């Protein structure tokens, strides 16, 4: 294919052509058109970024925190000025709607804002008089070189769960964006380049797991953040632990929504649930994909109304000007392989005996024949343990289960492999309290369909949804990126 540009790497303050021979086509999932190529950088190319980041560390870590933060203030301004441009790149390569892309950008800005509190949040503690004439002090020091490996579904926000925090705390950084959606980070790197950071402080290497693997088990990389499938989290967690590298590994999800029989605000409930399930075509780690209604009556009401509302989603190319600003717009799923997997899972659900109450497989989008669209799909009569309940389908495919009590719903949630988030809908304080204490997920919602914490709060799941022990965002981010060195000191009076 001629005329299709190849994305570059950004190493040591320079845009560099990758030296590798192989590239991957970046497709617009709405129409299958190739919009660019991404190089599958070699391990050696990633290692070059590590060398640059390591060389930049002494100077950057000794730069006053106020100056480091000032770069982030500028970055926030530039990104805000270009929000619409970035959102369009994001919507084109990932397939989410423009309102969704803009919402993602808001999270980018908020993460930068929280990181800009570094002069407060990086402060240490001092205890005068731990013992006679002895003081104790905790100081939070930058550590060295950090890398992040991010997934396709949040090409702007996921990198910014890490970049601002790593940089303000005095570390140097390498991002390896998803090979499926590298263009958003490419455009954002152009703005980072305008900051005039010292070379090597921020680097970007494109590629797949080969490029990413250079950061893991590498003594020159002090820490790795990974967001992606749980199976990959496990590999990364094991290797990093063995190499004594710091790591974060945020994995897959199957988020449950529980509707209690007391809930009466049906219209708000249904719209809240359907946007949680079908927004971003179900490809959010915080998307809900399993609904549990308590009791026969609520199960019947929820199933009927939810399916009715699901049919109201407009499925289209998110950049089609006729519908681009629609709030109930759903774009394509990310790849042909993903669509094929989703179809296979729908077949599995039918074979397992669930009722396919709404089938999104045959959807046709005029003018987007080659896009990877799946319409809203709903299974009812689903039983816990069916494959369609166990598996993260990462699609606009929702399973509805009838359960008899809150205890039973909590047990189903707690027995599930994934424990990223879950929500309850109730006006009853007793049920809400019981749910937030007993449901074992990292993020809990009460009458909120997507309980995604704002960046002032920590973000992360439990069980197989988070295979590490330190969350992202907020105060934990400052802990991850700093060494809490403890000083015990004593001075004698001069003779
Ligand atoms: P993925 O695991 O396929 O890829 C994620 C990143 O890992 C990519 O950059 C990829 O190149 C890299 N990678 C793949 N295999 C690797 C390996 N063996 N070693 C090192 N790097 C490797 O995930 P995806 O399909 O891009 O993203 C979707 C998944 O991410 C879903 O499971 C979703 O739930 C999860 N996710 C989780 C969160 C969270 O906060 N828990 C947030 C967003 C997405």
Image: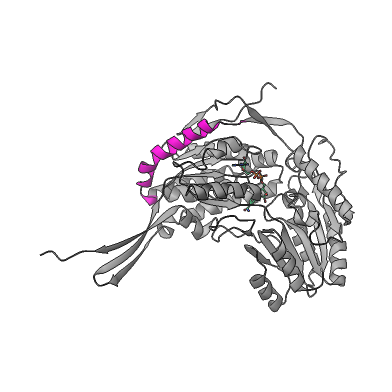
Residue appearing at x 50%, y 55% in the figure:
477
For the residue pair 394 and 247, the one nearer the viewer reads as 247
For the residue pair 268 and 412, the one nearer the viewer reads as 412
Could you tell me residue 306's position as x and y percent? Answer: 83, 60
Number of on-image labels: 0
Ligand 1 found in image quarter = top right
- Residue 490 in the figure: left or right of residue 353: left
For the view shown, which residue lies furthest in the top direction? 2
**Which corner quadrant holds the N terminus?**
top right
Which image quadrant is residue 119 in?
A: bottom left
Please name the predominant secondary structure of the magenta segment in the image: helix
Residue 229 seen in the figure: no
Residue appearing at x 65%, y 41% in the figure:
90
Residue 431 seen in the figure: yes
The residue range painted magenta reads: 39-66
Could you tell me residue 215's position as x and y percent? Answer: 51, 40
- Render colour scheme: one colour
For the view shown, which residue lies furthest in the bottom direction? 430
Residue 165 on the magenta span: no
- Residue 298 in the figure: left or right of residue 287: right
Residue appearing at x 68%, y 38% in the figure:
93
Q: Is residue 44 above or below residue 223?
A: above
For the view shown, which residue lies furthest in the left direction? 495
Residue 65 on the magenta span: yes
Q: Is residue 49 above or below residue 376?
A: above
Could you tell me residue 337's position as x and y percent? Answer: 76, 39
**Which corner quadrant holds the C terminus?**
bottom left
């Amino acid at each position: 294919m001629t005329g299709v540009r190849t994305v570059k790497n950004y190493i040591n303050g320079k845009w560099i052509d990758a030296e590798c021979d192989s590239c991957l086509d970046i497709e617009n999932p709405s129409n299958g058109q190739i919009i660019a190529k991404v190089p599958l950088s070699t391990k050696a190319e990633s290692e070059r970024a590590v060398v640059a980041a390591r060389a930049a560390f002494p100077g950057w870590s000794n730069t006053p925190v106020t100056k480091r933060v000032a770069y982030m203030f500028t970055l926030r301004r530039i990104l805000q000025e270009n929000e619409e441009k970035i959102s369009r790149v994001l919507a084109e390569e990932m397939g989410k709607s423009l309102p969704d892309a803009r919402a993602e950008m808001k999270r980018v800005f908020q993460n930068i804002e929280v990181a800009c509190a570094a002069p407060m949040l990086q402060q240490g503690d001092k205890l005068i008089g731990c013992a006679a004439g002895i003081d104790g002090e905790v100081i939070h020091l930058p550590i060295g070189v950090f890398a992040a490996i991010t997934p396709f579904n949040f090409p702007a926000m996921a990198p910014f769960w890490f970049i601002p925090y790593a940089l303000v705390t005095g570390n140097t950084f390498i991002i390896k964006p998803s090979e499926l959606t590298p263009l958003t980070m490419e455009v954002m790197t152009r703005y980072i380049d305008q900051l005039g950071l010292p070379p090597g402080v921020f680097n970007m290497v494109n590629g797949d797991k080969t490029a990413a693997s250079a950061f893991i088990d590498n003594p020159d990389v002090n820490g790795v953040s990974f967001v992606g499938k749980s199976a990959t989290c496990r590999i990364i967690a094991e290797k990093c632990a063995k190499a004594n590298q710091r790591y974060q590994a945020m994995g897959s999800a199957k988020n449950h929504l529980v509707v209690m029989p007391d809930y009466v605000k049906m219209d708000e409930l249904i719209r809240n649930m359907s946007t949680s399930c079908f927004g971003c075509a179900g490809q959010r780690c915080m998307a809900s994909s399993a609904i549990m209604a308590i009791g026969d009556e609520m199960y019947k009401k929820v199933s009927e109304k939810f399916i009715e509302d699901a049919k109201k989603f407009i499925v289209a190319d998110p950049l089609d000007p006729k519908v681009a600003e629609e709030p109930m717009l759903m774009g394509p799923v990310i790849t042909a392989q993903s669509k094929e997997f989703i179809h296979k899972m729908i077949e599995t659900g039918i074979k397992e005996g669930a009722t396919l109450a709404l089938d999104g497989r045959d959807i046709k989008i005029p003018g987007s024949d080659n896009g990877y669209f799946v319409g809203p799909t709903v299974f009812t009569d689903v039983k816990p343990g069916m494959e369609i309940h166990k598996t993260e389908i990462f699609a606009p495919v929702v399973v509805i289960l009838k359960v008899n009590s809150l205890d039973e719903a909590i047990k189903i949630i707690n027995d599930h492999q994934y424990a990223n988030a879950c929500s309850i809908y109730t006006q009853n304080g007793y049920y809400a309290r019981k749910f937030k204490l007993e449901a074992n997920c990292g993020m809990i919602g009460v009458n909120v369909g997507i309980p995604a914490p704002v960046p002032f709060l920590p973000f992360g799941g439990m069980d197989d949804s988070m295979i590490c022990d330190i969350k992202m965002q907020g105060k934990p981010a400052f802990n991850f990126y700093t060494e809490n060195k403890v000083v015990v000191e004593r001075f004698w009076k001069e003779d």
